[in-house]
Image (cartoon, grey):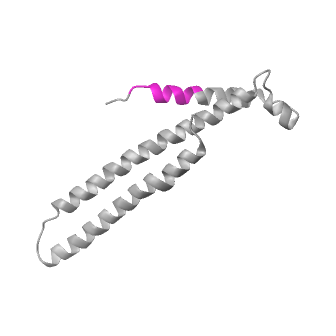
């Protein structure tokens, strides 16, 4: 179960920090590269390592963000499917009519698709 608050806090917290870290590393690398070329010094290994580390960290946080997005999508689809079941009929109680069966079916298929995607083994 994932709510929108978890996704929002990850987006504005860890993901934003990772993007800022990469941006700072690139700016520092450009600044050092400009200074080193003026001195004819080509010692950019530390800067390249810092940029590579920042890119790796950003990729990891983007992957986590994608997983949170999928979990939120699954939670929303599960809620839509559950609330339309006989005996619950949340849509009938709130709106006065049941949810369309096509939307009910589509929500179930999307939810099942996210489960299959999460459980499918990686190609590595």
Q: What residue lies at 67% left-to-right and 29% top-to-bottom? A: 106
Q: Is residue 99 visible?
A: no
Taking the image as shown, residue 100 lies to the left or right of residue 71, namely right
In the depicted structure, whether residue 14 falls above or below residue 99: below
Q: What residue lies at 54% left-to-right and 36% top-to-bottom? A: 71
Position of residue 102 measured from the top left corner of the image (x, y, whole percent)? 73, 28
In the depicted structure, whether residue 11 falls above or below residue 46: above
Q: What residue range appears in magenta?
A: 112-121
Position of residue 97 measured from the top left corner of the image (x, y, whole percent)? 86, 32
Q: Quadrant of the N terminus?
A: top right
Taking the image as shown, residue 107 lies to the left or right of residue 72, namely right
Along the line of sight, the residue nearer the viewer: 52 or 89: 89
In the depicted structure, whether residue 73 falls above or below residue 84: below
Q: What residue lies at 62% left-to-right and 26% top-to-bottom? A: 109
Q: Is residue 117 highlighted in magenta?
A: yes
- Secondary structure, magenta segment, majority class: helix
Q: What residue lies at 22% left-to-right and 59% top-to-bottom? A: 48
Q: Quadrant of residue 112?
A: top right
Position of residue 69 measured from the top left corner of the image (x, y, whole percent)? 53, 42
Q: Is residue 13 highlighted in magenta?
A: no
Q: Residue furthest bottom?
A: 38
């Amino acid at each position: 179960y994932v709510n929108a608050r978890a996704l929002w806090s990850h987006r504005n917290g860890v993901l934003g920090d990772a993007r800022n870290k990469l941006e700072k590393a690139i700016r520092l690398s450009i600044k050092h590269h400009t200074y080193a070329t003026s001195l004819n010094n080509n010692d950019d290994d530390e800067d390249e390592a810092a940029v590579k580390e920042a890119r790796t960290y950003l990729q990891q946080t983007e992957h986590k963000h994608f997983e949170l997005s999928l979990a939120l999508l699954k939670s929303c689809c599960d809620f839509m499917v559950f609330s339309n079941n006989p005996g619950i009929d949340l849509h009938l109680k709130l709106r006065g009519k049941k949810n369309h069966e096509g939307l009910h079916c589509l929500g179930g298929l999307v939810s099942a698709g996210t489960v299959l995607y999460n459980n499918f083994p990686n190609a590595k």
